[in-house]
């Protein structure tokens, strides 16, 4: 093997696979999902990213863009939005379809708003559960603790 011949199976990596990986990352797929779709082990994807830094950075950028798209969509749902749409109606007098441009309104979504705020401002919006202890805490030795446990167990066994 000292004559420059590589051992092992030749890599399937090529420009076509590279573009497919980047495309799947843009679509929000994880490395595990990408590997499954391409038909390789996830470790192969990770190895390719290690050997081809341009692939690594392209996948990171694609995943970041996908995350930003979801973030923008969540924000729109949280605050409400509107968009132009075309409605198609059937005119029974003329027996023709008629198109009308309308503006569809979507009100703010409380669940999306709460999710946004809990994650963006957790100190203000997280659901806190405060527990207050109302009793005394005894400092017991190991022997006293064992005695109390045995007492409780014997009472439990007697009641059976």
Image (tube, rainbow, N blue to C red):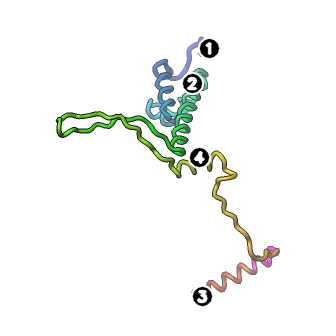
> CA–CA distance between discs 1 and 4?
58 Å
Viewer-closest of 65 and 12: 65
Earlier residue among tags 3 and 2: 2
Using the image, tell me which numbered label, if any, was put on residue 2: 1
> CA–CA distance between discs 1 and 3?
80 Å
Q: Quadrant of the C terminus?
A: bottom right
Circle 1 or circle 3, nearest the eye: 3
Circle 1 or circle 2, nearest the eye: 2
Q: Which residues are magenta?
A: 141-147
Tell me the crowding category of disc 3: few under 14, some 14 to 19, or many 20 or more residues within 10 angstroms, Cα based.
few
Q: Residue 52: say if magenta.
A: no
Tell me the crowding category of disc 2: few under 14, some 14 to 19, or many 20 or more residues within 10 angstroms, Cα based.
some
Using the image, tell me which numbered label, if any, was put on residue 159: 3
**Label 2 element class:** helix
> CA–CA distance between discs 1 and 2?
35 Å
> CA–CA distance between discs 3 and 2?
69 Å
Residue 110 in the image, given as x and y percentages of width and height: 53, 52
Viewer-closest of 103 and 31: 103
**Label 4 element class:** helix
Using the image, tell me which numbered label, if any, was put on residue 148: none
């Amino acid at each position: 093997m000292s004559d420059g011949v590589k051992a092992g199976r030749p890599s399937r990596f090529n420009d076509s696979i590279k573009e497919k990986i980047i495309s799947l990352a843009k679509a929000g797929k994880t490395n595990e999902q990408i590997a499954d779709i391409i038909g390789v082990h996830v470790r192969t994807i990770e190895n390719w990213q290690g050997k081809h830094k341009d692939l690594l950075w392209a996948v990171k950028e694609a995943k970041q863009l996908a995350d930003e798209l979801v973030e923008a969509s969540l924000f729109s749902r949280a605050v409400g939005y509107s968009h132009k749409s075309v409605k198609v109606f059937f005119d029974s007098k003329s027996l023709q379809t008629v198109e009308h441009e309308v503006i569809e309104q979507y009100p703010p979504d409380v669940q999306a708003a709460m999710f946004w705020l809990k994650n963006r401002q957790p100190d203000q919006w997280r659901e806190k559960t405060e527990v207050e202890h109302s009793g005394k805490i005894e400092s017991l030795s190991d022997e006293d603790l064992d005695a109390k446990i045995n007492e409780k167990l014997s009472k439990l066994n007697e009641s059976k």
